[in-house]
Image: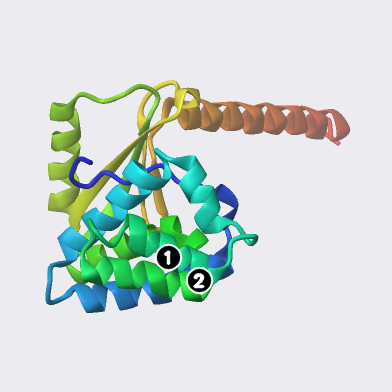
Amino acid sequence: MAEGERPVKRVHSVMEDPSARAVARVYATALLDASAGVGVASTLEELGSFLSDVLDAHPGFADLLGSVAVGRDQKLAMIDRVVGPVGTPLFTSFLKTLARHDRLELLPLILDEAHRIDDRRSGRKRVEVTTATPLDPTVLESIRQRIDAAFTFSPILDPRIDPSLIGGMVIQVENTVYDSSLRTRMKQLRDRLRERSLHEIQSGRDRFSHPEGD
């Protein structure tokens, strides 16, 4: 998996649940703290690889780990058998902790939260850059450099595609959105024209209601 790339989010309902995200944040923090001695980057890579190369690639195994019909002891045995021989002791132990608490379905959220926490601790922030069509890598690097010069943090670009933008781009830093898309500019133009038309109509009514000389 490429550096900085995140796996496909498998369970959207869980990913969008605020309470689930809060619980995932607790586990993500514990995982990062435990990884300090062995390397946070390698732990995040191992978790990301497990999600994309194991669970996404083998949905049958993923279903077994997430099934309420499979007992905890069976899940622990599967983790020992499948992950134990190839995974690090820390990661294997972490999966077994999640299994004991019936939290394995939170793995995509835990990875997402772990990246966020690690970025924050390292002075980095994820910046969503949404355009109508894919951007050339040189253009993305130019955007990254401009954002880096404008803010106090180190930006990590998260390019996204939304054809409805038509042109331009939307940049989102946490909850702040910088929208220079053609779609938004056209909407703003329509709104201004509508306001001008309403103003002219109202002015005409006022002149009609109060003729000069009255």
Is 104 situated left or right of 171 in this image? right
Residue count near mark 1 (Cα–Cα under 10 Å), binned few <14, some 14–19, many ≥20 = some
Kindly indicate the quadrant of the structure image that contains residue 121: bottom left
Q: Name the residue at 30% across, 57% down.
A: 47
Q: CA distance from mark 1 to mark 2?
A: 6 Å
Q: Name the residue at 14% across, 35% down.
A: 142
Query: Looking at the picture, which amino acid does disc 2 mark?
Result: Asp
The x and y percentages for residue 41 are: 17, 60
Query: Looking at the picture, which amino acid does disc 1 mark?
Result: Ala
Quarter of the image where the C terminus is located: top right
The label number, if any, that marks residue 77 in the structure image: 1
Residue carrying label 2: 73
Helix, strand or loop under label 1: helix
Is 42 situated left or right of 129 in this image? left
Quarter of the image where the N terminus is located: top left
Mark 1–mark 2 CB contact (< 8 Å): yes
Q: Could you say which is closer to the camera, residue 207 or residue 113?
A: 113
Asked if residue 175 shows in the view, the reply is no
